[in-house]
Image: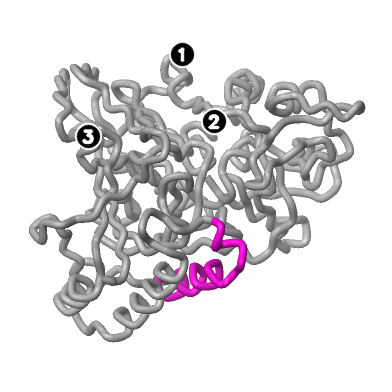
Amino acid sequence: MNSCHATRRLAAHLYVTNTSSDIPVGEWKAIMRSQGVLLVWTVLAVGLCGGCEKPSEEISLSAEPNYSAPLPVGELALRKVTDPARVPDFAPAFIFQTGLAEAVERSMNYLSKPSSTAYFPYGEVTHQHAVVSLETFREVLAQARSGAELDSLIRERFDVYESVGYDGTGVVFFTGYYCPIFDARLVRDEEFKYPLYGLPDDLVKDSEGNCKGRRLPDGTIVPNYYDRRDIEMRLPLAGREIVWLRDPFEAYIVTVQGSAKLRLEDDSFFEIGYVANNGFDYVPIGLRLVEDGKIPANRLSLQRMIDFFKLYPNEVSYYTHMNPRYVFFMPKPGGPFGSLNEPVTPYRSIATDKDIYPRACVAFVQTTLPAWEDGRIVQKGYHAFALDQDTGGAIRAPGRCDVFLGTGDAQGELAGRTSAEGRLYYIFLKQ
């Protein structure tokens, strides 16, 4: 993923993966209530907020949702809503506009680049149609004075498209990602000795920036690159280090999230961002920690994983090497950046599979997101507009969407607890 990045399922094989991060969760009862999926709960008692101690539970499923089910080749993730009764109520989005205008401008900036034309048309939506849709949406935001007026203007001026979801019924599984802040050094010492690497000279990318493989001295290209275990154990990239961290699991988190703000010795920040990956698929490790009895299922969170590995640092590599995917970095101030090479905006940028969703366009999210309230994490309904500006190693297929929640530990805790089904819509100016 080209940003900070992951979430998936845990209880009943629920675990979390971000847009590049493996931040597990297992406390949300709502995620298991998927439409059309029959759940059988035993010893039911799931905590819906961080810090709520609840008894353990067991969950059995008669049908397990596959949120990563792919679309048939050549199909797109969106279908036009022709029944007015199926158009969502846009009014609640009126109160969720912080950063929205800024995110719109960043999408406009992306679409002003000649390279963006290569990804259109998207179905019947041309590049110019996407641009005009953003311009009109910007005008509507400035014009609307209430939720009702916002809803009326959107319905009047825009066609609405909905995601087909993971099973064709429109159900999308939403997760969260964030940009971590960790201490780091530009020169290795006895305390800071876990490296992050820059782009390898022998890594070969295609025109889309995807890893094609590794170039051998004779010019031959072999599939994929070194996996995480090889990179960390055999050290083939010695000399390509760009920064050093004090904690091996913090280094792992950065390679999963895809970006970071790193605090140097003089309290200045060294910002790094995604430049490439090694071509391997992302594999989450949270479920394995639960299966091995290292962390109780109902207590699994990013902070719990961090705490566990601080107590047992010798176990870090055993688990992290289960995820072969590795991300390489470059200095990138002004971020974090999404896959469009534009900065992402908290709560206003989403990550989707860019092979099947339209880049930079206006989306409408209906789901549940965690929020801090009186020092606790609670779940709240979230109906808001966002811009499709990112992607991720774990974000594939129409049934997956990641919401960027911001930077720092507090937002990381929220990202690790973002795990809910919902609906995803896009709007385009009526022809």
Tell me which amino acid carries mark 2. Answer: Tyr
Identify which residue is drawn at 34% across, 60% down: 363
Q: Quadrant of the C terminus?
A: bottom left
Name the residue tied to disc 3: 29
Q: Residue 367 carries which label?
A: none
Q: Where is residue 133 in the image (x, y as percent from the top left)?
A: 37, 72
275 in relation to 289, above or below: below
Q: Quadrant of residue 64?
A: top left
Say which label, 2 or 3, has the lower sequence index.
3
View extreme (right): residue: 218
400 and 248: which one is in front? 400
Tell me which amino acid carries mark 1. Answer: Asp
Q: Residues within 10 Å of mark 3 (few under 14, many from 20)?
A: some
Q: How far apart are marks 2 and 3 (CA)?
A: 25 Å
Name the residue tied to disc 1: 292
253 in relation to 221, above or below: below
